[in-house]
Image (tube, coloured by chain):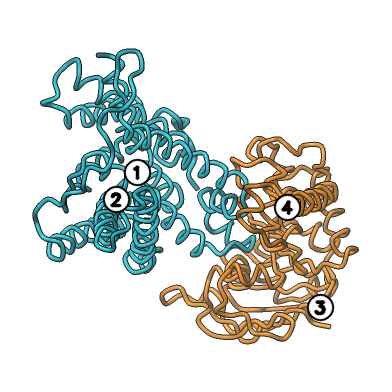
Chain colours: A cyan, B orange
Amino acid sequence: MFLQQFIQGLTLGYVYALMALGYTMVYGILQLINFAHGEIYMLGAYMTVISFGFFTGAGLTKTHLFLSLILSMLLSIIFVSAYGATVERIAYRPLRNAPRLSPLISAIGVSIFLQNFVMLTQGATYKVFPPVFSNTGLTIGGAKVTPVQLTIILLSSVVMIFLHLFISKTKTGKAMRAVAQDRIMASLVGIDTDRIIAITFIIGSALAAIAGFMVTLYYSLINYYMGYIAGIKAFTAAVLGGIGSIPGAMVGGLLLGLIEGLAAGYISSEYKDAYAFIVLIIILLIRPAGLFKRPMEEKV
Amino acid sequence: MHIIEFKGLTKYFGGLAALEEVSFRIKENAIFSVIGPNGAGKTTLFNCLTGLTKPSRGEILFKGKNIVGLPPHSISKAGIARTFQNIRLFKEMTVLENVLSGQHNSYGQKIWSSLLRTKDFLRQEESLRQRAYEYLEFVGLHEELNKLAGELPYGSQRRLEIARALATEAEVVLLDEPTAGMNPQETAEMMQIMKRLKEIGKTVVLIEHDMKVVMGISEWIIVLDHGVKISEGTPEMVKNDPLVIEAYLGKETHA
């Protein structure tokens, strides 16, 4: 049972981690909790279902299932990144020099808008993603790992490695670090900070789209308010790791998933959603800066 | 040749004029100082010049082109760099990384070539590092490459800011109180650095309170008081200007 719950927790943890990265990157660069991030993830799930439905209609899924899945994910990434960049442009950029509370309220507004927008255009009922993977899977030490779980674990790991390389090795990645440390100084060494901020939102949204894609494969059911609870959990994961810290978001996500998986197995799955909040309260009480940040880290 | 020209620059903060109809010109490859009592508008002048503050009125010509309204990163690209009175380094980055950050616009880079570390990329990276090293050598920090910027002693942090400013390949370097808080030896070293900046062809614009520094190295000085230019000239001329003595040096003797 331990291993089974562990695998389940790990799978969820990877989804939380991908989303937590979006929260943490935006926070790192703007000190803004992007409360609309959960809705971006929800859009990722909807775009997956819509694209896959389109390919089914075109008859592609019968002949090339794998290809249609990849294409659905790519389409979802493209559309959702565009949403993310648009939200930044119209809801946050005009408030760049406003008091910190203003963009926060704007974020909540965007979140409510997107939920209702999807409800009105896509309907208030559940959408179903056809079960395309077999449920048999392989067995490791008595625990079953399904193909979807394996896909999630592998895909997320690859994405995270890419993100790490992007941030540490590329020019844009280095500029992101400079903007996070001191936005004004970054602009004075010639970095176009608005562009870097837009790129940060695009990357965060792309990660959320991948998370939405994976969850759609995993649960097969999506709805317009799925982003709310997932968003809060991913936010918890980001705080657990230390908001603003990228390794923190990765580890925080995995840890939160594992806590949830194991607690659901050993304590009760009735309170599945409550564990994340218990964790959040405990961190805020004993280590508010999170696991990966020095407590008094200076923010310029 | 004049590299920078201010024409009737005016900046209001609310009803308060931080700068009022300030006009002057800066010669290319000169060491030029802006002095004046606290609150005279010196830093506001630098902020207008680097695009951090938008003037209410007036023009700033850089090599004949008006740069008012350009965002800071474009002005940096055009060739103006600065340091800050309260040091602003990327404290969580190493000394070398800070200088490399200044080279942001001196190279183009494809994401794939940097992720795959192609030959071209590695060659470019090597030449950037070489140049960064030279800038650090210029300010005498070439032995501290991998230290975190925030862990350097105060005087070294100021010199690192200059190395980073040089890395943007600026023609004009603005120094906001570069010797503030320094001991006499560090101050002497900083003056040497400023002289060498001139030798390598840079124009140095200085805000400074230490009169020994100002009078020692400036070729031309303007004096601001309450946002208004009250005097300008060589150190000799400014020193003997009764208006300056009244507004500035006069106050110092009372203090």
The residue that mark 4 highlights is B121
Q: Residues within 10 Å of mark 1 (few under 14, many from 20)?
A: many
The residue that mark 3 highlights is B27
Query: Of tags 3 and 4, which is closer to the observer?
Result: 4
Badge 3 element: strand
Image-based side of A75 in relation to A163, left or right: left
Residue A41: numbered disc: 2
Indicate the quadrant where residue B209 lies: bottom right
Query: Of tags 1 and 4, which is closer to the observer?
Result: 4
Looking at the rendered structure, the kind of residue marked 3 is: Lys
Which chain is indicated by disc 2? A
How far across and down, in percent of the image, does residue A114 sit? 21, 60
Question: CA gap, disc 3 to disc 4?
Answer: 39 Å
Residue A19: numbered disc: 1
Q: How many marks?
A: 4
Question: CA gap, disc 2 to disc 4?
Answer: 35 Å
The answer to whether B54 is drawn above or below residue A136 in the figure is: below
Query: Of tags 3 and 1, which is closer to the observer?
Result: 1
